[in-house]
Amino acid sequence: MALVAGTSRGFSSILFYLVVYAFMNLGAFAVIIALARQGEERPTLSTYAGLSSRHPAMAFAMAVFMFSLAGLPPTGGFMGKFYIFSAAVEADYVGLTVIAVICSLISVFFYLRVVVVMYMEEPQEGHPSPVVSPAILITLLLATAATLQLGIMPAGVWDLAVRSIRVFWG
C-alpha cells in the first residue's frame, strides 16, 4: 500500500515498518527456537499451552510480538500500520486502506490465538519449561524493548526514515 501511494510518506512508512517487522519477527522466532524440541520438525500450537506458567517472561515477550504483528497498540506494529494506512489515505487510496484494515482485523484472530493458548490453556504433558540460552535471552530482551519502544515513542526512528527518504526523494 505504501509503495502504491508513491509518496515520500509512503516510502518512509515502508522503512519504519521494515525496522519494526525485523524486531517483532526476530523476537517471535527466538521464542519458537527456544520452544523447539530435539527431533521435532516444528513446534505446534499445543507447544505454547501454559507457557505463561512455565516461562512467564517468554510468554510476555511472545504476547508483545503477537500484539505487534496484529497491529495493536502500544506496539511498533500498530505505529507501522498507522503510518502505512495514513500514507495510503493521503494518496487517495481509501478503498485499499479499508480492505487492508479489514484484513488486519481478520489477522488479529490468528495472532491472538497464540496468546490465548499461552495464557488460558494448561501445559501439555511432555512440554517442559524451555531452557533459554544467553543468546536467546538477549535477543528476546532487545526485540521486546524495541517493539514496545517503537510503539510508544516512534518519533526517533520515524524521523530517521523520513530523512533517509529525503536523500533519495529530494
Image: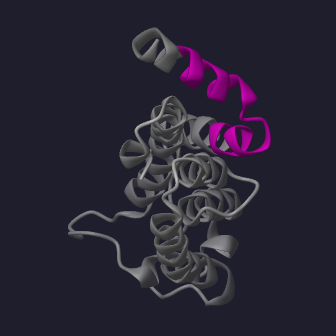
For this view, does 141 lie left or right of residue 10? right
For this view, does 13 lie left or right of residue 120? left
Q: Which residues are magenta?
A: 145-163
List x then y, in percent, for residue 4.
Answer: 36, 48
The reply to whether residue 49 is in sight is no
Q: Is residue 74 magenta?
A: no
Residue 56 image-quadrant placement: bottom right
List x then y, in percent, for residue 119.
Answer: 68, 80
- Residue at 64 percent of width and 29 percent of height: 158
Q: Main secondary structure of the magenta part?
A: helix
Residue that protrudes farthest toward the front in the picture:
92
For this rendering, which residue is in front, 113 or 38?
113
List x then y, in percent, for residue 26.
Answer: 45, 44
Q: Is residue 157 magenta?
A: yes
Residue 44 image-quadrant placement: bottom left
The reply to whether residue 39 is in sight is yes
For this rendering, which residue is in front, 113 or 16?
16
- Residue at 33 percent of width and 65 percent of height: 37
